[in-house]
Amino acid sequence: MDAPVDKLPLGELLKARGVIGDEQIAFALHEHTVSGEKFGSILTSTGLVTEYDLALGLADQANIPYHDLDQLAIDTNLLRRVNRNLCLSQKFLPVLRDENQILIATSSIDFASMTQTVTRHTGKVDAR
């Protein structure tokens, strides 16, 4: 790849990873133009890519870490300490904590805002 990952369009990033080709990109772009549906949603709803491949691609594009929640032991005590309605409205899930940090799962890429929200409501110094 010549361009940094975060500068590549999603289709090109998925192509570089060997997930889709030019024909699939052209199809999804056409559908996006016609319907206004999100490019990634078109790719998954038509079966061109898996949700997993899309999530990895979006995480790479945004330069954020991706964690498979099926592979993590979620801290249930932490879940009890964070307001359920806050998690639902802000679309995040507290997963793990250590002394000064909380690992959250979210589909949001606005980390500055998410970090402030989690820190304000949990008292932890840093959300990651």
Image (spheres, rainbow, N blue to C red):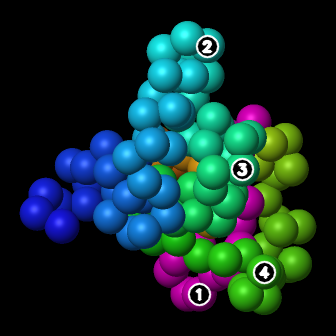
Query: How many C-alpha atoms fall within 10 Å of the one at disc 4: few (<14), some, or many (≥20)?
Result: few
Residue 41 x, y percent position in the rendering: 64, 37
- Secondary element at image label 3: loop
Q: Which residue was labeled with disc 3?
A: 47
Kind of residue sitting beneath label 1:
Asp
Tell me which corner region of the image, top left, top right, bottom left or bottom right, holds residue 75: bottom right
Residue 3 x, y percent position in the rendering: 13, 58
Query: Going from the N terminus, do you reach mark 1 or mark 3 first?
Result: 3
Using the image as rendered, state which of residue 108 and residue 25 is in the foreground: 25
Residue 14 appears in the rendering: yes
Q: How many marks?
A: 4
Vertical placement of residue 37 versus 55, above or below: above
Residue 37 x, y percent position in the rendering: 61, 22
Q: Which residue was labeled with disc 4?
A: 70
Query: Going from the N terminus, do you reach mark 2 or mark 4 first?
Result: 2
Residue 127 appears in the rendering: no
Query: Going from the N terminus, do you reach mark 4 or mark 1 first?
Result: 4
Residue 73 numbered mark, or none: none
Q: What is the C-alpha distance between the residues marked 2 and 3?
A: 17 Å
Q: What is the C-alpha distance between the residues marked 4 and 3?
A: 22 Å
Kind of residue sitting beneath label 3:
Gly
Query: Going from the N terminus, do you reach mark 2 or mark 1 first?
Result: 2
Q: Give the residue drawn at x 46%, y 28%.
A: 29
Q: What is the C-alpha distance between the residues marked 1 and 3?
A: 39 Å
Q: Which residue was labeled with disc 2?
A: 35
Residue 26 in the magenta stretch? The answer is: no
Q: Report the span colored magenta.
A: 89-103
Using the image as rendered, state which of residue 67 and residue 118 is in the foreground: 67
- Secondary element at image label 1: loop
Q: Which residue was labeled with disc 1?
A: 98
Kind of residue sitting beneath label 4:
Asp
